Image (cartoon, grey):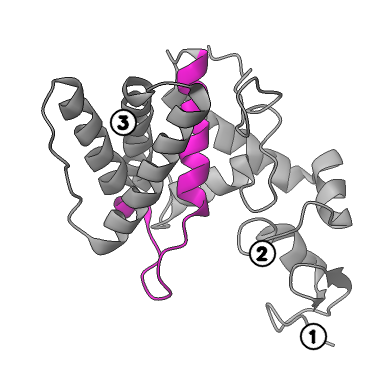
Amino acid sequence: MLCPVCNVRKAKRACPALGKSICAVCCGTKRLVEIACPADCGYLASSRTHPPAVEQRQLASDRGLLLPLMQGFTERQARVFLLLGAAAARHRGELLQAPIDEDLAQAAGALAGTLETAAKGIVYEHQPPSLPASRLMADLKSAVAELSTNAGGSIDRDAAIALRRIERGAKSMAGHTSSSTGFLQLLGRLLAVQGGAADPALQEGSDQPGGPASSLIIP
């Protein structure tokens, strides 16, 4: 039986997410990117314990792109950045209007502008120009509100700083890949948003309810 994902190679691995067997190549390359693997998948657990060389190189490349964006962060800002990045990567939008990096840059920039304006005592909600970006901004806004509730106070200043870095990352990714969703995919791989566990280098424990911490040592 051919793999139903690629329709090229033989299906040899039972995929609990799809409910059918797929080939090893699709399992390895589309895991947590196009396939929402459950946390108890044996292949997922094995890959995290013994990742193949190609995945290790991808992981090193991803970290190399993300770490500079987090330079100068306080621990709280790093946590906010990772949580908002995970919220962005989880967002799927409408069927025919899936978000791209440009939408993320617009959404993060507009919400950061709103928070920065509010800090000056002016109530004005900046709006991104596209509908997909507006939908994504709504999710990011909800994430900021939830983080404020969990933190027991406003995190607007830290959220604005984190959002500006996300905006920068989404804009700069164009120079590293031809994909229009390169930065969103990077966030998905590092934060493993479908599988529920973040890259151990970015999340190793938290004293905030329900959110990843960053005990990452930022040079």
Report, in whole angstroms, how far the alpha carbon at label 3 lies from the one at label 2: 29 Å
Q: Which residue is mark 1?
A: 2
Q: Amino acid at mark 3?
A: Arg
Left-right relation of 73 to 206: left
Q: Any magenta on residue 177? A: no
- In the rendering, at what x and y percent does residue 28 appear? 75, 58
Characterize the local packing of mark 3: few (<14), some (14-19) or many (20 or more) Cα atoms within 10 angstroms: many
- In the rendering, at what x and y percent does residue 163 appear? 35, 33
Report, in whole angstroms, how far the alpha carbon at label 1 lies from the one at label 3: 45 Å
Q: Nearer the viewer, mark 1 or mark 2?
A: 2
Residue range of the region highlighted in magenta in the rendering? 75-103
Return the mark for residue 106. none
Question: Residue farthest to the bottom?
Answer: 1
Residue 62, compared with residue 22, is above or below; it is: above
Q: Amino acid at mark 2?
A: Ile
Left-right relation of 13 to 61: right
Return the mark for residue 35. 2
Does dot 2 land on a helix, a strand or a loop? loop
Left-right relation of 73 to 121: right
The dominant secondary structure in magenta is helix
- In the rendering, at what x and y percent does residue 69 appear? 42, 26
Q: Any magenta on residue 89? A: yes
Residue 23, compared with residue 185, is above or below; it is: below
Q: Amino acid at mark 1?
A: Leu
Q: Earlier in the sequence, mark 1 or mark 2?
A: 1
Q: Earlier in the sequence, mark 1 or mark 3?
A: 1
Does dot 3 land on a helix, a strand or a loop? helix
Q: Who is closer to the viewer here, 209 or 73?
A: 209
Residue at the image position 51 percent from the left and 35 percent from the top = 83
Location of residue 95 (image quadrant): bottom left
Q: Which residue is mark 3?
A: 164
